Image (cartoon, coloured by chain):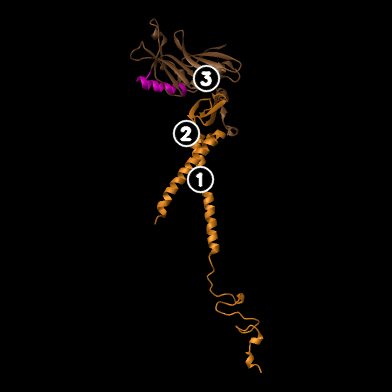
């Protein structure tokens, strides 16, 4: 029996992940659009308010820190895996935190509606060989929401910063 | 007439044995050839994620032991992928194996029936009652010896002794 376990036609996990990276890292808009739709249904609001949105495209994991639409000092973390939406977990915040300054609405970042283009621009900005998008996250720059894209390759990595419309602001190799 | 009543349990048993055998065979074939599940890509994968991959995860399950899990993914051109799991692919592989085996069994059954039909046709006796002319004496006739009338063994017996003068 041991001799028969040839596993013909199967791919090792490491080879599969390498193939995902070779194809670009798995960045598609539905990675985030599906969880956002579920969030809207969960909260009963059309345009939820977020403090953080972080995407790991290869693992299909999205983390969202969301302001409670009713109790706006309450922040909950939702983790989405493979398009689903997990149960919310409370996030500790400081009493001095200015949530209004840190929060943004999904509609404030139109670039979230075309992540493919965002990923392509980030990869093109560096020109690394065999590069892929490792992570995408939101942030603030001069009080404006921005998107930060981590680009990696076997020999280099860098960070590309885009404004809310998807225009490249900076590309910084690390 | 008890023929139909006794056949039904046998048929049920035959179906159960067949299904069990196909399931066990599929469990073995998926260990040896897990890539067979990729044949189900047209059914389990959508147009946005058309490429099927069967990914193996091998881990240590104890001292000197390793276990392997299989997961099927449907992958799109940008590396986006859907986790299909292994239960549905295994069911699909079982269905494929079942159809193939059923077709092979049906082929053998049909061949056997055709052979039996031909043998029955060959055994049926001819319908003509008249025997051929040189086939020997027919029933009810007495054998002759050297052209002598029946009952005469030799020419000496042709005429009784007391009549010879």
Q: Quadrant of the N terminus of chain A?
A: top right
| CB atoms of marks 2 and 1 within 8 Å | no
* Circle 1 residues within 10 Å: few <14, some 14–19, many ≥20: few
Along the line of sight, the residue nearer the viewer: A157 or B7:
B7
Where is residue B122, by image quadrant?
bottom right
Q: CA distance from mark 2 to mark 1?
A: 21 Å
- The disc at residue A119 is 3
- The disc at residue B165 is none
* Circle 2 residues within 10 Å: few <14, some 14–19, many ≥20: some
Q: Magenta stretch?
A: A30-47
- The disc at residue B102 is 1
Chain B is which colour? orange
Chain drawn in brown: A
The residue labelled by disc 2 is B88
Q: Position of residue B145 (x, y in %)?
A: 64, 81
Along the line of sight, the residue nearer the viewer: A119 or B27:
B27
> Is residue B39 visible in this depiction of the protein?
no
Q: Nearer the viewer, mark 3 or mark 2?
A: 2
């Amino acid at each position: 029996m041991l001799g028969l376990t040839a596993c013909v036609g199967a791919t090792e996990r490491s080879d599969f992940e390498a193939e995902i990276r070779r194809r670009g890292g798995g960045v598609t808009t539905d990675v985030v659009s599906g969880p956002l739709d579920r969030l809207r249904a969960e909260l009963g609001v059309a345009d939820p308010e977020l403090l953080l949105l972080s995407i790991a495209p290869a693992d299909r994991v999205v983390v969202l820190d969301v302001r409670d639409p009713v109790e706006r000092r309450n922040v909950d973390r939702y983790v989405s895996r493979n398009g689903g939406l997990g149960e919310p977990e409370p996030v500790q915040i400081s009493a001095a935190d200015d949530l209004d300054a840190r929060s943004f609405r999904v509609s404030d970042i139109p670039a979230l509606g075309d992540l493919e283009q965002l990923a392509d621009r980030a990869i093109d900005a560096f020109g690394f060989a065999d590069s892929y998008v490792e992570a995408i996250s939101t942030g603030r720059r001069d009080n404006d929401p921005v998107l930060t894209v981590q680009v990696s390759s076997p020999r280099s990595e860098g960070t590309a910063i885009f404004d809310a419309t998807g225009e490249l602001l900076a590309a910084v190799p690390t | 007439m008890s023929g139909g009543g006794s056949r039904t349990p046998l048929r049920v048993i035959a179906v159960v044995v067949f299904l069990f055998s196909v399931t066990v065979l599929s469990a073995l074939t998926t260990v040896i050839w897990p890539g067979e599940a990729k044949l189900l890509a047209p059914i389990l994968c959508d147009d946005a994620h058309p490429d099927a991959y069967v990914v193996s995860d091998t881990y240590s399950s104890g001292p000197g032991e390793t276990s392997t899990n299989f997961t099927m993914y449907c992958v799109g051109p940008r590396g986006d992928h859907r986790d299909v799991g292994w239960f549905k692919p295994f069911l699909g592989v079982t269905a494929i194996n079942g159809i193939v085996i059923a077709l092979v069994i049906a082929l053998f059954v049909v061949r056997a029936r055709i052979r039996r039909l031909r043998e029955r046709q060959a055994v049926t006796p001819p319908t003509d009652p008249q025997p051929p002319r040189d086939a020997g004496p027919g029933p009810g006739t007495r054998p002759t010896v050297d052209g002598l009338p029946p009952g005469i063994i030799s020419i000496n017996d042709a005429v009784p002794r007391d009549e010879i003068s």
